[in-house]
Image: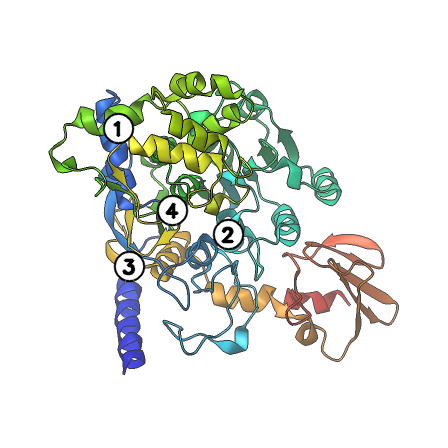
Amino acid sequence: MRKLSLLFTLLISTVLMLAQEVRPVKNVIVMIPDGTSVGVYSASRWYKFYNKMGDRLHIDPFFTGTVTTHSSNAPIGDSAPTGSAYATGVLQKTSNVAIYPEADPENDLYPVDAARTYQPAATLLEAAKLMKNKAVGLVVTCEFPHATPADFSSHYHTRSAYKFIAPQMAYQNMDVMFGGGNSILTDDIRQHFKNNGTVLIQDDRNALLNYNGDGKVWALFGERALPYSIDRNPDNVPSLAEMTAKALDLLSKKEAGFFLMVEGSQVDWAAHANDAVGMITEYLDFDDAVGEVMKFAEKDGNTAVIIMSDHGNSGFTIGSRDCPGYDKLSIQQLFEAVSNYKLSANGIEAILINTKPENIKAEFKKYTGIDITEEELQTLLSSKNYKESDYTQVGTSNNMAHNIVNIMNSRTCFGFTTGGHTGEETLLASYHPQGDILRGNVRNVQVNKYLQKALGLDKSLQELSDEIFVKHTDVFAGQKYSVNRKDPEFPVLTVKKGRNTLEIKAFSSVGKLNGKPFDIGSVAVYMDKNDTFYLPKELVTKL
């Protein structure tokens, strides 16, 4: 009965969605403040107001509804399946990146096509590039193969498999990729950039902001992610708004228009850490990027924008049971302490782990205004391992950043229910030059349907998937083929017919025909789960 009810609800919502007119536009921009719950918007506004930065957010005039965001078999999702649902219109299981998931009949919230399991699901970015000849780009503050950017530009069953996700992103031949992750670049990626003329800018803010070329450009900062906005040296590391403005400047030169995804990646990370000032300042950094996007969109007159988080995180509230009488406090009492924090807990940790014990009290006060107690000092000194390497565990393990956060939070009246993701709806903002905005409560896959319409796609993403991600056993049925596993992680598919030999390397878009390289038209995705290459079906014509 429950399944029938869900199917009926899905049918009705799909019919309503399909009935909405969405006139295609030249440019489509998706913006995702990762892990941003409604409390973050509220706290960010009050933080601005208290600090005389204004009383509104750039996003405020554009709120139009909420999004119910979830994975294929659970109401609470992580960034991989929830971002993938926005990118592909396909619900996915935890950790999946833009693929058709395994079925889980006992728990699937909506029907899952088990016949498609592990098939890569074409993304909006791929469709914009391949079907509409648009320029495409990503701007993020995390390392470039992290979940959300990976969702729009790669395919794999496990989000943490950077070794397979990073090359796919490089071989997508994106026009713009700004973010973090210099240490993740491989010799193969660097060589591909040289081969296709991609300009690589590393740790050079001025070079990025002054770049005016018309070719493809990647700009990466830091070994992994960029620092939190509040910890950032503005002379060396660009803000998200600066990177977004530069991406808009470069992409808007393209005649066919563009597709751009911008992520405020680390609101989520600060939420995992229960770091209130980190959450607020990361969101405000994202909101400044929203300001750049909306200024561009309203002036351009041919750009649609969708803004929504992929899930909630931490149960963040202004008010806590541990703070008696919090509902009677003034704005000064609620926001003075957090406004005195000059660094995130991570930023303070980076200083304290190199500080002599006798100087820790003075250093802590320098960056927070807090006179820590002797007991709090001992807690800091006894922090296990001093630093937690897994950002999702910072809020719960006995690392120094966690202990710093506890001290900082004890001087505020902010509350947290968890150090993990939460299942509430996320806020939706929408802009369309002709008023064809997305309204009300929608599901994550409906956001994708809307974006397909805004891009004016001539066929569905599923149809595109069935053209560019076909099993090699079907593409080359009746042909003589083999898989060379000399490099077990990057096998090579070899197909022979007469004097012709075709070679396709896993996670690359460059094939070889009789030893000569050519662009195969899409990235070749290899799934070890079923020992299958997924390839454009037209490759057989090369033989």
Q: Earlier in the sequence, mark 3 or mark 2?
A: 2
Amino acid type shown at disc 1: Tyr
> What mark, if any, has residue 35 been given in the picture?
4
Q: Are marks 3 and 2 in contact (CB under 8 Å)?
A: no
| Residue visible at 59% across and 33% down in the picture | 220
| Secondary-structure class at tag 4 | loop
336 vs 361, nearest the viewer: 361
Amino acid type shown at disc 3: Val
| Secondary-structure class at tag 3 | strand
| Residue position marked by numbered label 2 in the rendering | 152
Amino acid type shown at disc 4: Gly
Q: Earlier in the sequence, mark 2 or mark 1?
A: 1
Q: On the rendered image, what quadrant is the C terminus found in?
A: bottom right
Instruction: Assess disc 4: are there few (<14), some (14-19) or many (≥20) residues with their C-alpha within 10 Å of its C-alpha.
Output: many
| Residue visible at 43% across and 46% down in the picture | 396
Displayed quadrant of residue 337: top left
Q: Are marks 4 and 3 in contact (CB under 8 Å)?
A: no
227 vs 28, nearest the viewer: 227
**How far, Cα to Cα, is label 2 from label 1?**
33 Å
**How far, Cα to Cα, is label 4 from label 1?**
19 Å
453 vs 260, nearest the viewer: 260
> What mark, if any, has residue 535 been given in the picture?
none
Instruction: Assess disc 1: are there few (<14), some (14-19) or many (≥20) residues with their C-alpha within 10 Å of its C-alpha.
Output: many
**How far, Cα to Cα, is label 3 from label 2?**
20 Å
| Residue position marked by numbered label 1 in the rendering | 47
Rendered view: 374 above or below 486: above
Q: Are marks 1 and 3 in contact (CB under 8 Å)?
A: no
Q: On the rendered image, what quadrant is the N terminus found in?
A: bottom left
Q: Earlier in the sequence, mark 4 or mark 2?
A: 4
| Residue position marked by numbered label 3 in the rendering | 442
Looking at the image, is mark 2 or mark 1 nearer the viewer? 1
